[in-house]
Image (tube, coloured by chain):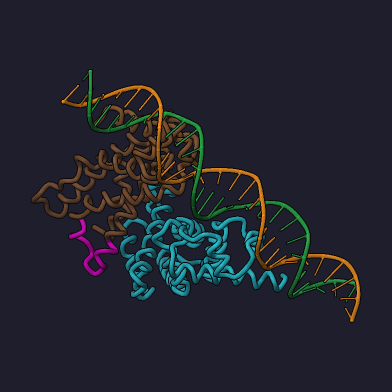
Chain colours: A brown, B cyan, C green, D orange
Amino acid sequence: MDRRQQKTRNAIYDALSELLKKKKFEDLTVQDIIDEANIGRSTFYSHFETKDQLLEEMCREMFEHVFLHDLAPEAGHDFSGGHKVIAERLTHVLYHISEHKENISAILGGESEQTFVRFFREYLEDAFDDVLGHGNMKIPKDFRKQFIIGSFVETVKWWITAGLKLAPEQVVEYYLTLIGGGAK
Amino acid sequence: MDRRQQKTRNAIYDALSELLKKKKFEDLTVQDIIDEANIGRSTFYSHFETKDQLLEEMCREMFEHVFLHDLAPEAGHDFSGGHKVIAERLTHVLYHISEHKENISAILGGESEQTFVRFFREYLEDAFDDVLGHGNMKIPKDFRKQFIIGSFVETVKWWITAGLKLAPEQVVEYYLTLIGGGAK
DNA sequence: ATGATATCGAACACGATGTTCGATATTTTT
DNA sequence: AAAAATATCGAACATCGTGTTCGATATCAT
């Protein structure tokens, strides 16, 4: 990739990151980003079709980083073993997420939260796949899935919004405790 | 209230309801609503400041209807008693919600979902207040609260998106089962 | 060195928003 | 029934953000 493109891309990402400290994403204009990034107008549009696409790509990059090494479930685990693996995996995810806390905190609370959550759920689906087999079979699988994933997203939102004061291990324990009764 | 205002207001609500069958809320323009409602442009703006305010007021009206008669918890209940009351109350809520399924289905899935959910949570806070005292005290109350409410919202979203095929009693049972382990 | 490609940025067309205001219609009050 | 109050109408307008275009300029790859 051309160095110029790489520079521009970084400038845009940095600008967005910086601006998110002051304003909600939905209140930013493309012009704001252009000015902060110090690039030409048409340059921005040669990289991203819209402001929202920029946000999506930023989210995708974040989650690709967060989930990169934590997806593959270890084979041959029974019920309790699987349970432990899941705890470790979720803890990993939280640790990675905390590395992006600046951006994520800024995104949560506003309307762009929806974009963030959409990606988060998408990536979580894989991570939870192997836990679902063990559930309460009287309850529809797609409901259990939505419940488990949705609850985890809620948990993370709470954790981040409250300022990431708890240790990831603690948060995961809370989560597994509350979810433990019916979903395991 | 002046009859003319009442008429206009209804025309706007009906127009929105009608248009939501064809388009997502965020894709509607004020002009669309004006045309469908067959009113003058300035008339719309004399009733609502923005399109979003219209959606908010519509949500408020819906939830005021949904929650109107189901809020007051019956006094003097112990643990299990309180649990039963909550089930009945939630079932009630679901029945009321299904009366608005047309509009709600249209709102869910798009960006306007966030507005809907925000109101829903707000109204649910009161409904869940008396259940929270019984929870696992090792887990922060605000987390348990967000978890319980968030899970119920997820449940309702799942129920509606899947086409309201299950009976409200059934849905509540599923919900209480999944949540039962840690939150009761 | 040279051809390819990225950036610049002013200018433009477009669409939606929200306001204004005088004319008209309807309702409420007396 | 007349008068006063108030709501609606709708064309016109100012504003703002978007996304595109294009020729000039700068940077990169080979």
The stretch of residues the image draws in magenta is A131-144
Q: Is residue A140 magenta?
A: yes
Residue B119 % position (x, y): 50, 59
Q: In the rendered image, which quarter contains the C terminus of chain B?
A: bottom left
- The answer to whether B42 appears left or right of A108 in the picture is right
Name the foreground residue: B182 vs C6.
C6
| Residue B86 seen in this snapshot | no
Return the residue found at the far left.
A76
Q: In the rendered image, which quarter contains the N terminus of chain B?
A: bottom right
Identity of the residue drawn at 36% across and 76% down:
B167
Residue A133 % position (x, y): 18, 60
In the rendered picture of this protein, how many numbered marks are placed on residues? 0
Residue C15 % position (x, y): 50, 55
Q: Is residue A11 magenta?
A: no
Identity of the residue drawn at 24% across and 69% down:
A138
Identity of the residue drawn at 58% across and 56% down:
B50
Residue A167 % position (x, y): 33, 37
Name the foreground residue: D13 vs B180.
D13
- The answer to whether A78 appears left or right of A6 in the picture is left
Residue B98: name its quadrant. bottom left
| Residue A43 seen in this snapshot | yes
